[in-house]
Amino acid sequence: MLRLQKGIPYDEFFVGVFDEEYGPFVSEDGAFSVQMPLNDKYSILIWGINRETFKLYGEVRADLTDKEGEYSLGTLGGFPKDLGLLEGTVKDEDETPIRGYVEVAGQIVPIKSDGTFQLKNIPLGKITLKVFGKTPDGKGPELYKEDITVYLNAPTSKDIFVVK
């Protein structure tokens, strides 16, 4: 299984073993299975649906599982996880930019005067996006909250309309 931050599965990806390509895999739980010649170790390359390279894993051990003739490649360590980009706008129903900030995965950025925001290097997969208003003392109420999915293959765009 291919999982990102906090065990969240990556649901669309390709897997390369030796000089062969397998996929695309579409899997809600990040699981995949391929048939290949039996060796002690394998070199694995995993990349996204739009062919951007994720990571090369060299010399991954193959261990026999409980099922006859089935081997597992175990855990692939070092998978990058904070490669997401989220950008968008926050406005009210009159198209007026909201004064405040956006929070994702502990990162907080102010909303610019034109209503735009951008968060870089955020976790891939399912995350919670929050928008907070701004008051004169710098603190504000939560105005919006939504679980969204951040993908590696392109910036994730989110335009938010906050109802007054």
Image: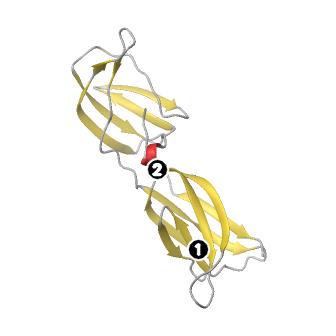
User: Could you tell me residue 70's position as x and y percent?
Assistant: 37, 14
Residue visible at 27% across and 22% down in the picture: 62
User: Could you tell me residue 4's position as x and y percent?
Assistant: 43, 45
Binning the other alpha carbons within 10 Å of mark 2 as few (below 14), some (14 to 19) or many (20 upward) gives many
- Whether 112 is drawn above or below 31: the answer is below
Q: Secondary structure at mark 2?
A: loop
Identity, as a three-letter code, of the amino acid under mark 2:
Leu
- From the image, which quarter does the N terminus lie in? top left
Q: In the picture provided, is 38 more to the left or to the right than 101?
A: left
Residue visible at 62% across and 83% down in the picture: 134
Residue of label 1: 116
Residue 65 sits in which quadrant? top left
Along the line of sight, which residue is nearer the eye, 61 or 154? 61
Q: Residue furthest bottom?
A: 136
Q: In the picture provided, is 60 more to the left or to the right than 32?
A: left
- From the image, which quarter does the C terminus lie in? bottom right
User: Could you tell me residue 72's position as x and y percent?
Assistant: 34, 23
Residue visible at 47% across and 49% down in the picture: 153
- Whether 60 is drawn above or below 158: the answer is above
Q: Secondary structure at mark 1?
A: strand
Q: Any mark on residue 71, and which?
A: none
User: Real-space Cα distance between discs 1 and 2?
Assistant: 21 Å
Q: Residue furthest top?
A: 68
Residue visible at 30% across and 32% down in the picture: 44
Q: Any mark on residue 152, and which?
A: 2
